[in-house]
Amino acid sequence: MSIQLALFYFFAAVAVGSALAMVLNLRNTVASAMSLVITMVSLAAVYVLMDAFLVGALQIMVYGGAIVVLFVFVVMLLNLRQDDFPPPRQRFVKALGTLLVLFALGKLVAAVPGALPEAVARLPEGFGGYRDVGTALFTRFLLPFEATSLLLLAALVGAVVLAKRRLD
Amino acid sequence: MIAETIGKILFVLLVVMGAFLPLITWVERKQSALIQDRVGANRADLAGITVLGLLHPLTDVLKLFAKEDFVPEGANRVMHLLAPVISLVPAIVMLAVVPFAGVYDFGGERPFSFVIADVDWGLLFVFAVGSIAAYGTVISGWASNNNWALLGSLRASAQMISYEVTMGLSVVGLFMCFQTLSLQEMSLAQDSTFRLLGFLEHFGVVDTLPAWLGWLQLPTWGIFLQPLGFVMFLTCIMAENKRPPFDLPEAESELVAGYHLEYSGMRWGLFYTAEFLEVPVIGCIVTAAFLGGWSIPFLDTQTLISGIGGTFGTGFATGLALVLQLLAFLAKVIVMIWLQMTIRWSLPRFRYDQVMDLCWKILLPLSLANVFVTGAVILWMKELGA
């Protein structure tokens, strides 16, 4: 087993383990958020192992460094405990949710073996670097890229409007 | 390959952790004393020998190790113990992409590059690792079960996230000038000079500059190509460091002591180690990006090696160039440390809204304008065929 493969299994296991820890930990919300950070960082390591360096760095910077910090920020401010949450949902809703999740999981597991390529493709020169990603973003994917920024701007303005209404 | 990497790691740790880190607490004491017209630390002695107070770092560590390691009641024990480590590790890891000297051809398989990990996305790595450091302060405040500490860590996280945004934007102009994100490649690009009045030729004001103006040259350092970028980057990275005048998270007059209020002994010392360690690390990063890295001004590597190589042989000349440029890098880092210390002891603490206004209302628009102007100038120069 090569070092890359061993590292992949290690980081994949950490990512899955900490993701489970995040969902199953009901007692401590901040600990859940920290598990999410570990998931993000191990995902970034997996990206780097796949030569997607820029995505790996952005994963840590944006998700690990900014978004989850804001999650932790909110969680700490609210300081919620178990009894602050609404009572659990109806049994029927629970069963339906479980069925839906199992269905999606089955589809995913069934899709994975077919998606694996026969032979490993060779990466083109400069793959995953900031130059290639930047060129792709500003040529082939310019319209989706700009549309996303519009979407984010709309969300931003919406948040300000909602917050302002409460302040006024 | 592996032996080379381990050698570089040991060297970097020895220089930064072994020499800069202990000395910097002494420098902090002595420089503050100088600025405040005092004598400064000079009492710690070993059999009557004080060596200018140089023994103080040693006594500090002894004291910190001897103190009780205290975890307050109601605190989250695991996270309380983990937080100082999360603060300290990123500062050390950042050093992996810092080029301490240039690229030298000793006739081996590959040229020798004096950087631990010469990755293509060097400065992005610094930002990514630096953003993790915010968790150390955030978690320490929350896990302490103390409202003052929590307020301190809330301030810390808001401040660090805000300045990360501006810090990234303030160096985009630099990326555009050097066409790279790697700190080693940036240093290589800064290893030359440009004529200060060369633009007159491009605009057709004069056909060729008179020869006597030839001495009007500047190194192609980031600070000369991106002066505004340099000021903004230095401001942001110092705000990330959370030392005065940006020490809002630990403003003792408002928050008792801030996020590390409930820490004692060496665990508290780790927070301070992280803060002190970041000073030379910031010096290294700013030097590599803006101050020409290891390059000696007006003496590029080629001239240096061929100049010495004529009498002493190329192999010796290359080795000497490595040592000289390493010394040049360390000298620049020391200048940056001096600058940070002077700022730290000269300016009073900002008010919290001033810190946020500086980031979002001044630095962010300025950095966007800087990106725009830099792009326009680069396009213009391409039009002119420069």
Image: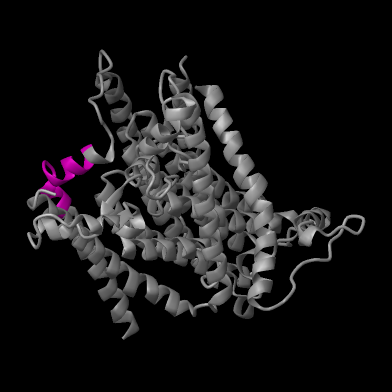
Whether residue A59 is visible here, answered yes or no, is no
**Main SS of the magenta segment?**
helix
Most extreme residue toward the bottom is: A168
Most extreme residue toward the right is: B47
Q: Residue at x 36, y 51 (%)?
A: A62
Report x, y in % for residue B256: 66, 75
Image quarter (top left, top right, bottom left or bottom right) of the C terminus of chain A: bottom left
Observer-nearest of B56 and B165: B56
Report x, y in % for residue B280: 55, 53
Q: Is residue A4 above or below residue B245?
A: above
Whether residue B182 is visible here, answered yes or no, is yes
Report x, y in % for residue B128: 42, 48
Q: Residue at x 66, y 48 (%)?
A: B19
Side of A43 relative to B180 (left or right): right
Q: Residue at x 22, y 25 (%)?
A: A124
Q: Which residues are magenta?
A: A132-146
Observer-nearest of B111 and B63: B111
Report x, y in % for residue B184: 39, 40
Side of B97 relative to B57 (left or right): left
Q: Is residue B199 magenta?
A: no
Q: Is residue A35 above or below residue A46?
A: below
Q: Is residue A139 magenta?
A: yes
Q: Quadrant of residue A98?
A: top left
Q: Residue at x 62, y 49 (%)?
A: B85
Side of B292 relative to B38 (left or right): left
